Image (cartoon, rainbow, N blue to C red):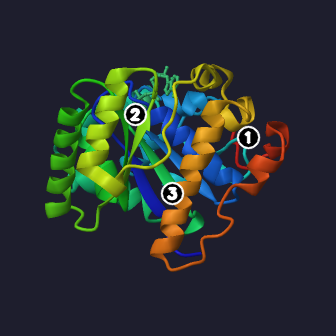
Amino acid sequence: MPAARIIAVANQKGGVGKTTTAVNVAACLAASERRTLLIDLDPQGNASSALGEVKTPHHVYSALLGECTLAEVVLGTDLEYLSLVPAGPDLVGAEIELVNSEERERKLELALASVVDRYEYILIDCAPSLGILTINALTAADSILVPLQCEYYALEGLARLLETTELVRGSLNPELALEGIVLTMVDLRNNLSRQVEAEVREHFGERVFQTRIPRNVRLSEAPSHGLPILLYDIHSRGAVAYLQLTEELLTAHAESQGVSTSSQTAPAASATSGESLRSGGNDERTA
Ligand SMILES: Nc1ncnc2c1ncn2[C@@H]1O[C@H](COP(=O)(O)OP(=O)(O)O)[C@@H](O)[C@H]1O
Ligand SMILES: [Mg+2]
């Protein structure tokens, strides 16, 4: 299998929908039978708990420090094609502990090297900062996917993020691309939301996904059940939006690779109930 496409889901602002987007795009990719790995790179571990992580002693940080391989910390999930590298609270120490280590920005890239050919997609859920962990993600990634909430100052925050991306491109990772900007928690009845959207689309044009993620209470409930939205409520507006976003992403990749774009959608996901998407037995789960 060719090397996975590595996508960092990043925005230094908290609460903009990074984790929700990373978890649910990863789940939709898996539902369309793309082998997908989700890496939780936020010490808060929200992506891990959103997938109902079982308690394990080893987390992503052990792999960053080289105490074990990344493959050793991979867990299975309720979806056959989706695996998870969980984060633990020890990741908080990374910002300080990595400061003096050699090639500190390349720890994740190095750790990923041994697994990139096992997956088609690797998504990295970043912490709300532009610290060393996020720099590691941007260094390892092929592209950055930016969830953006339409509110005041959204564009200023975005400008800073894109500056950082530029810096990484100039030094650590010349190939880093912008996968796209996705508007999250959209409320079309809200005037400000519509104004900000118009502005973002004017500035960034095609780099903004057509699909918007609406504000949808089912999306905020799913993590407490340890389930991606597809398995929690496949008929919700949130599920439909994330399936559509994933289809857009797959279509863009297929086009860039010169492949026919028809039927890129998640057939399993749209044709069946959430229950039947579960893989049942799971040999990768370690506990
Ligand atoms: N589209 C949405 N509709 C409703 N609630 C959402 C939506 N997206 C995210 N949330 C909720 O908003 C909060 C912040 O989202 P999250 O994805 O954790 O953001 P981040 O990872 O950027 O901090 C969470 O409680 C999440 O469940
Ligand atoms: Mg998060």
Q: Earlier in the sequence, mark 3 or mark 2?
A: 2
Residue bearing the label numbered 2: 42
Q: Say what secondary structure mark 3 lies in.
A: helix
First along the sequence among labels 2 and 1: 2
Ligand 2 is within 8 Å of the C-beta of the residue at disc 2: yes
**Mark 1 Cα within 10 Å, few/some/many (few <14, many 20+)?**
many
Which residue is disc 1 drawn over?
Answer: 78
Q: Which residue is mark 3?
A: 249
Q: Which quadrant holds the N terminus?
A: bottom right
Three-letter code for the amino acid on which mark 3 is drawn = Leu
In what quadrant does ligand 2 lie?
Answer: top left
Q: Nearer the viewer, residue 281 or 256?
A: 256
Q: Which dot marks residue 22?
A: none
Check mark 3 vs ligand 1: CB closer than 8 Å? yes or no: no
Left or right of 228, for residue 191? left
Q: Are marks 3 and 2 in contact (CB under 8 Å)?
A: no
Q: Position of residue 131 (x, y in %)?
A: 22, 38
Q: Secondary structure at mark 1?
A: loop
Locate residue 85, reporting x and y percent.
53, 44
Q: Position of residue 276 (x, y in %)?
A: 85, 43
- Marks 3 and 2, how far apart in space? 24 Å
Left or right: 111 as drawn, with respect to 50: left
Q: Find numbered disc 2 in the image and state the secondary structure of the residue it sits on.
A: loop
* Residue 61, quarter of the rendered image: top left
Tell me the kind of residue under disc 1: Asp
